[in-house]
Image: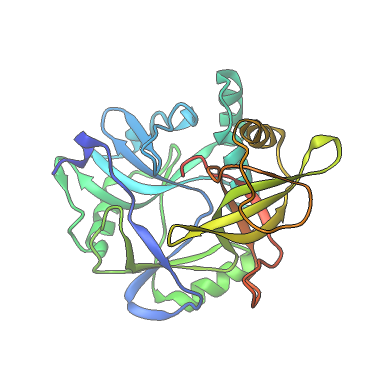
Amino acid sequence: MDLFKCKDVSPMLLESQEKPFDDDNYIFELKLDGIRCIAYLDNKTSLRNKKNVELLPIYPELTFLYKQVKDKCVLDGELVVLSEDGSPNFFLLQKRSLLTDKFKIELESKRHSVQFVAYDILQKGERAIVDLPLFERKKILDKVVKEGGGLSVSRIVEGKGKTLFSLTKKLGLEGIVAKDKNSAYEMGRRSKSWIKIKNLKDEDFMICGIVLGEEGKIKDLILGQYKKDKLTFRGKVFVNISKQEEGIILAFALKHQSKPHFKARGDIVWVKPELVCTVQYMMLTRDGAMRQPVFKGLRYDK
């Protein structure tokens, strides 16, 4: 199997859990707030998101990523933009993803450079190694990657998930990921071998309606999620949104209005549930509402 040739890898997905744990059979990593990405590196660079869309035109600063590896390889990792304090900044990354003008892309690539943080290696040379145990793949990853030039390797902690999780709470980071040392890489599958444990929760929702405020600007978004193919109301979120994303949502609403999806009060512009956004929140209330929801941005890879 030549993953490099077909270039259609679907990333392995994670289960969710609330409480951290210690286990010598697991390694633990920081959960980074970015965009999942597969990198195909040989004598050039190709970066693909979950939809298998090429991302290099948006992040040209990663053009020479292939020079940071010692062998042809396929890497699974995360694209991140780091704030001044060294923590991932998803808002800056989303801002970068909206740009289409080449001059602005070039300018932002210097102001807010994107980094690729490698979690895993799926192929080395001509051989796919997805069936090897994770711990073996991690050793190979360390040997293949030369850190620098926008490429780094995710650091791991063995066994002590509770300690790492406590550290992320103190630093205000998103959380941790626990991975079974002996797990194979299950492409496109959600596996209990990989578990995400978050301080702040975030979920993806369908935008089902818009509440307009003064001067026709978006005030709130009405959100829904599909459960067993049925669209279910999940509340609303106040939007502090960029002009670019507001323009995208309003333009979509003009062309794709719909009948009401739920019983809700107020002057709502209902739209077809096709746009996906991410909302971050503290926890769910007993009736399933989100506490302190914050709009993070549109998802262009879903």
**Residue 81 figure quarter:** top right
Question: Whole-percent x and y of residue 145?
Answer: 32, 45
Question: Whole-percent x and y of residue 262?
Answer: 63, 57
Figure check: 39 above or below 260: above
Q: Is residue 89 visible?
A: no
Count of number-bearing discs: 0
Figure check: 287 above or below 5: below
Question: Whole-percent x and y of residue 141?
Answer: 28, 52
Q: Is residue 132 visible?
A: yes
Relative placement, left or right, of 268 versus 51 is: right
Q: Nearer the viewer, residue 104 or 18?
A: 18
Q: Nearer the viewer, residue 224 or 205?
A: 224
**Residue 103 figure quarter:** top right
Figure check: 108 above or below 270: above
Q: Which residue is drawn at the image coordinates 46% and 26% (left, top)?
A: 57
Q: Which residue is drawn at the image coordinates 42% and 41% (left, top)?
A: 148
Colouring scheme applied when the structure was drawn: rainbow
Question: Whole-percent x and y of residue 242?
Answer: 70, 38
Relative placement, left or right, of 260 versus 20 is: right
- Quadrant (top left, top right, bottom left, bottom right) of the N terminus: top left
Relative placement, left or right, of 71 versus 243 is: left
Q: Looking at this view, name the residue that lies furthest to the front.
A: 259
**Residue 113 figure quarter:** top right
